[in-house]
Image (cartoon, helix red, strand yellow):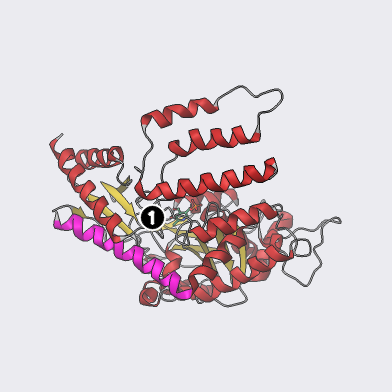
Amino acid sequence: MSNDDKLMRDAAERAISYRKSLQGRQVVPTPEAIAAVAGFDEPLSEDGKADSETLAMLDEIGSPASVAMAGPRFFGFVIGGSMPVTVAANWLATAWDQNSVMSQVTPAVATLENVSRRWLCELFSLPEDCAASFVTGATIANFTALAAARHKVLADVGWDVESEGLIGAPEVTVIIGEEAHPTLTKSLGLLGLGRDRALRVPVDGQGRMIADALPAIDGPTIVCTQVGNINTGAFDPVGDICNAVRPAGAWVHVDGAFGLWAAAVPSMLHRVEGMGAADSWATDAHKWLNVPYDSGVAITRDAAALKAAMAITADYLITDTEHRNPSDYTPELSRRARGVDVWAALRSLGRRGVEDLIERCCSHARRFADGLGAAGYEVLNDVVLNQVLVSFGDDETTLRVIEEIQRDGTCWCGATVWQGRRAMRISVSNWSTTVADVDISLEAMLACAERGKQA
Ligand SMILES: Cc1ncc(COP(=O)(O)O)c(C=O)c1O
């Protein structure tokens, strides 16, 4: 076996061992493992070091210092866990090392991406001819979809924003909810539409936009809605908002980083009613579809608007093809083959598997809420999706309990502030979380809560 072969096999063995360790290990690394990362900080060598030794160092220092985010008891932020088939497909596609720009020179990955696009439209009950952009995550998916929105609403009044920019352009009104995710406002800033310039629509106690409070629409307008509030999981009434603003020509965007997956589950369709009437949707694959980082998707009804915002030509590129050129729809030119992991996840799960995954996580979230509620702790949100917000008492006590839980390491949950109150967030998004994981975690949370209250 050549040294290169040995190296690849060694990497696979080490990765397999690491994945196996996720079930049993503490979620947080030990202080000693964290201290050991200083060992990476060596001088750049003159002549390089052996590959096998480099890989060993990565595993021996890096693996123990990693947080078990891919494991079944990490409930912080909204973190998926990469199903085995997606990691395996990702390895193979990494070995292919295709630059997913042009279909003619990357026929396999361009086709896989296009199949993933079609399957996603089907799963979310969106028109089959929507365009899709395979990007790094929901942040850039929001940016990408909103670039298409900016193109269209300005083209409608005769302004070519790609050529002319925004200086001297007709004013674009942007409307967002008070609870819009900060990456949505960041995207608006990147597009020259301003992080703080948007009109903000008030929300209710769950963080849902109040459709009746929308301002009157006049001129080029983009309305940004959200399905899946980062804290409560709540859904904006996207159908009502579409009914109110689309007749006036507004573009409606849906930030569905994780909540869009409710559209793939028949029992949850009422939560996203009317969402299909919107113009664009952003979601993550690295959250609830459980593919490796990084992976998000922007989908637009108006394929031409997305292409107008993103496509480029150059004499050395092969852009005049009857096939779909992936880079016609993405902010990047050179790019890894993200569609492969999405394709592998969807092919492995099928429709039923996606439904099971989403429903299972939501049922785990309800189990957490019931267990914490039964123990006398206050659940602050209606648990309509995979998010639970819990208070352990006053703000100081809640923060102390969260610190205890993070130190304990059986599971990991983060802190937030919900409508003025400190709360712990539990987000269940990992394919491998079982009822037993929930029960072990609940037991640890309740023990930490006792200790936190007494401190
Ligand atoms: C509603 C919403 N939008 C956007 C994002 C940003 O996603 P990403 O970090 O994958 O870019 C998140 C992340 O949690 C989110 O919940």
Q: Secondary structure at mark 1?
A: loop
Which residue occupies the foreground of this view, 259 or 289? 289
Q: Amino acid at mark 1?
A: Ile
Which residue occupies the foreground of this view, 433 or 148? 433
Q: Is residue 451 left or right of residue 255?
A: left
Q: Is residue 396 visible?
A: yes
Q: Position of residue 248 (x, y in %)?
A: 53, 73
Q: Is residue 171 left or right of residue 307?
A: left
Residue plotted at (49% across, 34% down): 60
Quick one: label 1, few (<14), some, or many (20+) residues within 10 Å? many
Quarter-wise, where is residue 258 in the image? Answer: bottom left
Per the rendered image, the range of residues in magenta is 351-374
Residue plotted at (66% across, 23% down): 45
Query: Is the CB atom of the residue marked by disc 1 within 8 angstroms of ligand 1's nearest atom?
Result: yes
Residue plotted at (60% across, 52% down): 191
Q: Position of residue 386 (x, y in %)?
A: 34, 61
- Label 1 sits on residue: 230
Q: Is residue 251 visible?
A: no
Q: Any magenta on residue 362?
A: yes
Q: Position of residue 118 (x, y in %)?
A: 59, 73
Quarter-wise, where is residue 263 in the image? Answer: bottom left
